[in-house]
Amino acid sequence: MSKETLEIISKQAQDYYRNTPVIILGSGASAAFGMSGMGNLAKHLMAHVHLADLPGNDKASWCNFCEKLNAGIDLETALHDVPLSTELTCRIVYETWTLLAPEDFKVFKDSLNNSTLFPLGKLLKHMFRSTARELNIITPNYDRLAEYACEQESIHHYTGFSHGYRGHSARKNYLSCSRQVNIWKVHGSLGWFTNSNGVITFLSNINEIPDGLTPLIVTPGIEKYRSTHKEPYKTIIHESDDVMDEASAYLCVGFGFNDEHIQTKLVNRCANNGASVIIITYELTDATKKFIAHEGTNKYLAIEAAHNNKSRIYSSLLDGPVEVDGDFWSLQGFMSLIM
């Protein structure tokens, strides 16, 4: 049964892959490289956001927020439930950058002596063997691992800004290039900043926040919906929406279907327009299982890890989930099905 199942899902994966899927990178794609997730970020914020110089109402709000986290409520829900002031939000942004930027830079340094560190780079290079001139990645992640993956394979990438040590906002065709990967970072990036006059800039691989600049990353919770109506998020989300609307296939890597900016488009394209979706991740979230079971999609392949180096597979071509030997839930393992 295992061999027969692998033949079925391999053919299904190849059929979907031929349609040049839009790649959606979730937090699980970064966790594979040791990047902190929401749990570690919550602990970091509770330990490092200082309150001594803040007014009493801010201190009370923060204590309420921390009580919810300590009670086991996840970070995004806690930020939804407890309104925080602009000053507290700024401190959250600062500490989020402070936690993630060194982790991101460590991955970059590790890659300098490891030419195989990023399976994503190999996948993109393989996808360009087709007639495609542009590939699209959509991600809510702040890190720059997708950019590093492109550069590992000498692939030109575009994130909304010009290249160089100090980039400015630019259209995706500002440079003429035969092949290009567009990376749509809907919640911002560790390299994006704004100054007190609202001037937005991109700075490459700095190891501390420059004086007078504020990182442009959208925190979870209510602030996410406020900030994304502003630039550069407004333009990036508009572009990513167009990409989603034009796609007929999606490849989700470590994406938990918990981000409304992305999943609403994805769910509707699959349910109403017959788009296909491949989902690979360490563990399928409840939201993902609900999507493949109840949202009306009839072209899906979802793979998660199981015990003893097995993979658990959910497919629209199978009657129910099955387990097979091998690691097909990671990007490296999945690529063995399509190459």
Image (spheres, grey):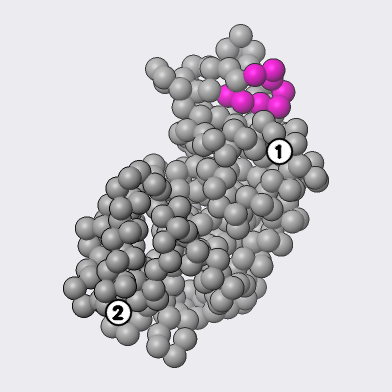
Q: How far is mark 2 from mark 1, CA to CA?
A: 45 Å
Q: Residue furthest top?
A: 1
Report the mark closest to the observer, 2 or 1.
1
Q: Is residue 194 above or below residue 14?
A: below
Q: Is residue 264 left or right of residue 94?
A: right
Q: Which residue is most to the right?
A: 273
- Mark 2 crowd level (few <14, some 14–19, many ≥20, 10 Å Cα): few
Q: Quadrant of residue 63?
A: bottom left
Amino acid type at image mark 2? Pro
Q: Is 20 positioned to the left or the right of 66 in the image?
A: right
Q: Earlier in the sequence, mark 2 or mark 1?
A: 2
Furthest residue toward left: 52
**Main secondary structure found in the magenta portion:** loop
Q: Residue 191 at x, y = what percent?
A: 40, 70
**Badge 2 is on which residue?**
210
Q: Nearer the viewer, residue 242 or 333?
A: 242
- Would you place residue 250 above or below residue 215 in this image? above
Residue 25, position in %: x, y? Answer: 52, 49
Q: Looking at the image, which residue is at 62% across and 35% down?
A: 290
Is 224 drawn above or below residue 232 in the view shown?
above
Q: Tag 2, which secondary structure?
A: loop
Q: Looking at the figure, which quarter contains the C terminus?
A: top right
Instruction: Tell me the element at label 1.
Output: loop
Judging depth in this view, the residue of 206 and 226 nearest the camera is: 226
